[in-house]
Image (cartoon, coloured by chain):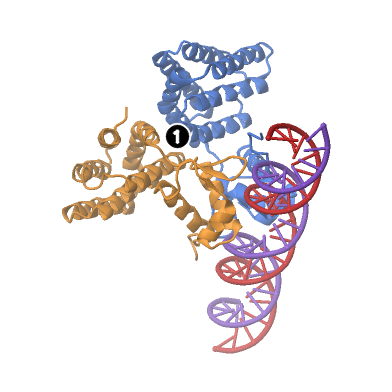
Chain colours: A orange, B blue, C purple, D red
Amino acid sequence: MNKHKSISLADIVFERLENDILGGKYAYGEVLTEARLCEEMGVSRTPIREAIRRLEQENILRESGKGMVVQGITAEDIADILDIRVRIEGIAARRAAEKMTPEQKKALVNAVDLQEFYVSKADPDNVQWQDHAFHEMIYEGCGSTTLQSTLVPLHRKAQKFRRASVEKINRAHESTGEHRRICDAILAGDGDAAEAAMNDHLLHARESMIGQLGID
Amino acid sequence: MNKHKSISLADIVFERLENDILGGKYAYGEVLTEARLCEEMGVSRTPIREAIRRLEQENILRESGKGMVVQGITAEDIADILDIRVRIEGIAARRAAEKMTPEQKKALVNAVDLQEFYVSKADPDNVQWQDHAFHEMIYEGCGSTTLQSTLVPLHRKAQKFRRASVEKINRAHESTGEHRRICDAILAGDGDAAEAAMNDHLLHARESMIGQLGID
DNA sequence: ATCCGTATAATTGTATACAATTATACTTTC
DNA sequence: GAAAGTATAATTGTATACAATTATACGGAT
């Protein structure tokens, strides 16, 4: 009856290493050896290697003869990520409006409700967590593994990066309002409105992020 | 002076397993155990496992308690892939027009020249190979690791799938003409034209593919 | 006959041992 | 003193051994 994979050391290492890199613990360009990571994480090379391969696949680490080079994420990468999301996440919202199950819709509403609550409590960490959950639910609910596997890493990178950046509560209020509009459209099964609302949301997010990062 | 990573068994297994799955050797839904793959490929579990993790990251395999389930790619996935590419590959073409080095441009021209040559020789395998090289060069030349790491897996999946499908020489001629227009725009450094030509190309490819697959 | 429990087999997770490659440092020679 | 070559150390690639978990099959009890 075990439906979900049990959590392995490799998964933990992957998560932690990604966090450490995107969170700035390791400087970009720094070279990481397997032995060093083994020592720091207290596990053997096997899970370390599996985590490394996955991070390599996501372009967060880069192989370079001797050791792995930390690629990390730059402000330009964040701009690129939002450029891409602006163009395709609307499709996911449309599909979600057409395909989400009642249970998924209920969970989505709950995420927006909670986000509003945490905004009112001025709790930026939980606001961001609900923001994260909201988008992931749409990726999950759109019914396309292609859209999901494309959007999840992009969103995750942007998310982790934001945790280290200044933006916290600034745009939280309007962002939550935009989520509410997307959510309402999905609940109504209105694909056009959901896509439009998502595009609107991401354009604002992009503008805000670009303003903060001082690029483009 | 070894600039490129040496090719490992894990890389070979990854490539081969991806090919075998997308090529239809393993039925979708089939369960693969590590032991079986070890035997079939004649290597130990270590490289098998690393390849599995990477394929899992690309949603080609799915973990399911006992063994890995073959996800593979459906006609709907191909449609989704082209929907996404239509929306973002134009950006890559624009960037390539702005950023490609003379060497990269020269290689790009060469790929289109070769593709035209193979079309004239009615050699579909090499036509497809040059088609593949053309797009990869643009991903590489656009200067964005985000665009690259997003587009490469999508393109690779579509490419491998096509190898197993009927479409071979059908659209090769017009496709090559479209590549030529994209290439000319990139050579001229005209980002607008490159983006427009790429969008045009992908819309045609999408239409052709959808017609063949009989979907939407 | 069926259901439950235990034992056994199969499978994955993890660690470690071993091999091969590559970089670095030291020594020797010119 | 510089350069080249060799030896040693460091690092990754691969295989295997061991542990833990889970499924399956068999046997006994009701």
The amino acid beneath tag 1 is: Thr
Q: Quadrant of residue A199?
A: top left
B167 on left or right of A205: right
A46 on left or right of A6: right
Residue closest to the eye, A64 or D14 = A64
Residue at x-position 25% and y-position 35%:
A204
Q: Quadrant of residue B1?
A: top right
Question: Is C15 placed above or below B125 here?
Answer: below
SS for callout 1 = helix
Q: Percent position (x, y) of residue B38?
A: 71, 52
**Residue underneath mark 1:** B146
Is residue B58 visible to us here?
no
Q: Percent position (x, y) of residue A145?
A: 46, 43
Residue closest to the eye, B118 or A209 = A209
Chain of the residue where label 1 is placed in the rendered structure: B
Q: Percent position (x, y) of residue A146?
A: 46, 39
Is residue B112 visible to us here?
yes
